[in-house]
Amino acid sequence: MGFDVLTFGEVMLRLSPPDFMRIEQTDKFNAHAGGAEMNVAVACSRLGLSSAYVTKLGDNSIGHFIRNQARMHGVDTSNILWDPDSRCGVYFVEFGAAPRTNRVIYDRKHSAISKVKPGEVEWDRLFKETSLFHASGITPALSKSCADTTLEALKSAKANDTVVSYDVNYRGKLWTPEEANKFTEPASELIDILITTEEDTKVVYSIEGDSYEEVAKKLVEKFGFKVVVITLRETPSVWRNKWSVFAYSEGKVYKSPVYDVEVVDRLGGGDSCSAGFIYGYLKFNDLQMAVDFGAAFSALKHSVPGDLAFINKEEVEKLMKGRERGLRIER
């Protein structure tokens, strides 16, 4: 069975105190499943694409909870690897309000996915009828074997003519800029669509410019990407942001509208943007449509608690038509 989109990476149990409480003062936590690549798979599925998610989970109730969250949204989970002797990663999110920012604490060391090895996933079989493969810089940062497996997947996707999208997603708590660069620069030759931010580009690639267009142009000239997507976020406060997306391809620039967003939960916002862009790219073969879908989908995701985008395509299309100011109650 082929898929429109296949993603690979870690997903964790996410625990967050309610009501803006700090971790040290709460006696309860809200539980969600969260991980960049599963977030993308779920969002793509909700937009109507057939999507599959590959990971390695602890074979226990937490792993089953995570798997079930993906299944609930129609994501194929039949290629998940299970490890009865390993744990699932956990991360804690403490929500703040200006001047106190949001804070994340990871508890993911020695998780099942960090032990995945080349040869465990039948990539060639999966990519034979898959349109696009999506990965991110989080996965290779987890361990040497994760980096090797990610590279194996990228090479297999390229060999099977599967489009590759890759979100740089730099995490300073997982690896250094030098470590990220050592993996990402060689891997970039296998990537068709690079999704990044100005900050991540500077940290991982040591590329800067006087404008976003110049940064994107330098990336394309150096690595030959078909498309570079850059997300733009202005943060005048923790809970009020401006959000937009821009893409560069073959010397042309594609810009989305700028959305004013009231942030309920920004985790997963970038992943929703990736999914919206992928949807537009695959469904319409139109970069302007892809940029517009990515920006609108992500703007809506900011209003939803949890990593996963409980958003439907009709809501995105409505927002894209300029009805974002119609904020009366829908009855």
Image (spheres, rainbow, N blue to C red):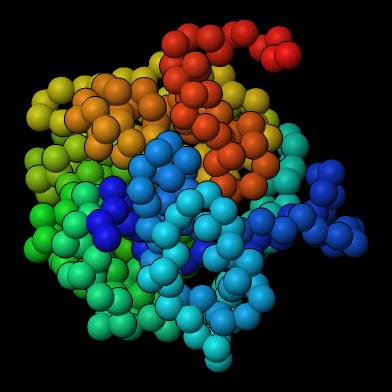
Residue 45 location, x and y as percent? Answer: 43, 45
Q: In this view, does 261 lie to the left or right of 39?
A: right
Q: Of 33 and 229, which appears nearest the observer?
A: 33
Does residue 123 sit above or below 111 in this rendering?
Answer: above
Quadrant of res 304? top right
Residue 108 location, x and y as percent? Answer: 57, 73
Q: Residue at x 15, y 44 (%)?
A: 225
Is residue 290 among what the camera can see?
A: yes
Q: Residue at x 25, y 75 (%)?
A: 122
Q: In this view, does 29 lie to the left or right of 238?
A: right
In the image as oriented, which residue stretches furthest toward the bottom?
85
Is residue 190 among what the camera can see?
A: no
Does residue 301 sit above or below 82 in this rendering?
Answer: above
Does residue 149 sit above or below 300 in this rendering?
Answer: below
Of the 4 image quadrants, the one containing the N terminus is bottom left
Number of numbered markers: 0
Residue 170 location, x and y as percent? Answer: 41, 55
Q: Is residue 236 left or right of residue 192?
A: right
Q: In this view, does 321 lie to the left or right of 311?
A: left
